[in-house]
Image: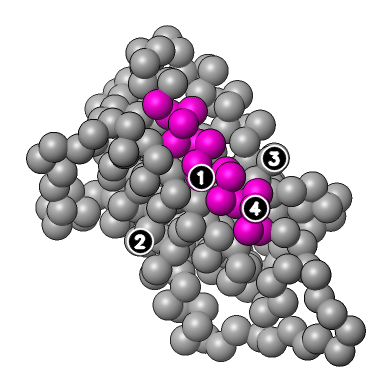
Amino acid sequence: MATPGTRSFRHSLFEDAQALITGTLFVAIGVAMFKQVGMLTGGTVGIAFLLHYASGWPFGALFFCINLPFYWLAYRRMGLPFTLKTVAAVTLMSSLSEALPRMIQFSGLNPWFAAIAGGLLIGAGMLILFRHRASLGGLNIVVLYLQDKKGWRAGYMQAILDASILLASLSVVSPERIGLSLLGMAAMNASLAINHRPGRYLAI
C-alpha cells in the first residue's frame, strides 16, 4: 500500500516504449511455447488460437483482427493514451507471433515446462503492459476497466473469463491439452493476481 507522502511518477515516453517492447516480447515467447505443444490460453489470444487451429489461418492476422472492435471501448473508458499504447502492443504482438518461429525454434519442448514457463512469461509480460497503462486488447481492456471502476482484481477476473474460453474449446483441442492449458493459465493469472493490485504500483 502507498504510505503517507508517497508520490506517483509519470512514465517517460522512453520508459513506455521499452515496456511495450519488453512486455509484448515476453507474451509472444510464451505464446510461441504454447503453440509449439498445441496449447491454448484465454482472452483474444485464446480466441485467435481456436480459429488458427480450426482454420489454419495465420495466428497474427487473426489476433489483430479480433481486437479491432475493442478499441472503441478502450478509448471511451480508458482514454486515448491507453488506447494508442494498446494498439501498438497488439500490432507488435501480431508481428512477433509470425516472426518468432523464424528466430527461435523449440526442438524438444516438454509440455509441462511449456505450460508453467510459458504461463509465467505471459503473466510477466501482461504485468509490464498493465503497469504502463497498456494491454493486449480484447478482454484485457474489459478486465482493466472493471479493476479501475469496481476494484475487482485483474488476475481473478481474467481467470474466470479465460476458463470460460477453454471450456468452449473442448471440441477443438484434446482434454489433455486443455489440462495443460489450464495449468499455463493458472501460472499466468497467479502472477497477475499476486502482483497487480490497485495502489501497489504508483507510476502512471
Q: Which residues are magenta?
A: 180-196
Kindly state the secondary structure of the residue where label 4 is placed. helix
At label 1, counting other C-alpha atoms closer than 10 Å, the crowd grade (few under 14, some 14-19, many 20 or more) is many
Q: What residue is drawn where x is 53% and y is 36%?
A: 186
Q: Is residue 122 left or right of residue 134?
A: left
Disc on the earlier residue, 3 or 2:
2
Q: Quadrant of the N terminus?
A: bottom right
Q: Nearer the viewer, mark 4 or mark 2?
A: 4
Query: To which quarter of the image does residue 161 belong?
Result: top right
The answer to which image quadrant residue 109 occupies is top left
**Label 3, on which residue?**
157
Residue mark closest to the camera, 1 vs 4? 4
User: Is 142 drawn above or below residue 3 in the view shown?
Assistant: above
Mark 3 surroundings within 10 Å by alpha-carbon count, few (fewer than 14), some (14 through 19), many (20 or more): some
Looking at the image, is 63 positioned above or below residue 76?
Answer: above
Using the rendered view, name the quadrant where residue 38 is placed: top left
* Secondary structure found at label 3: helix
Question: In this rendering, does residue 175 appear at all?
Answer: yes
Distance of mark 1 from mark 2, alpha carbons?
A: 15 Å
| Residue in view at x 36 percent, y 46 percent | 117
| Circle 4: residue type | Ile
Q: Contact, CB < 8 Å: mark 3 with mark 2?
A: no
The C terminus lies in quadrant: bottom right
The mark found on residue 188 in the picture is 1
Disc sitting over residue 194 in the figure: 4
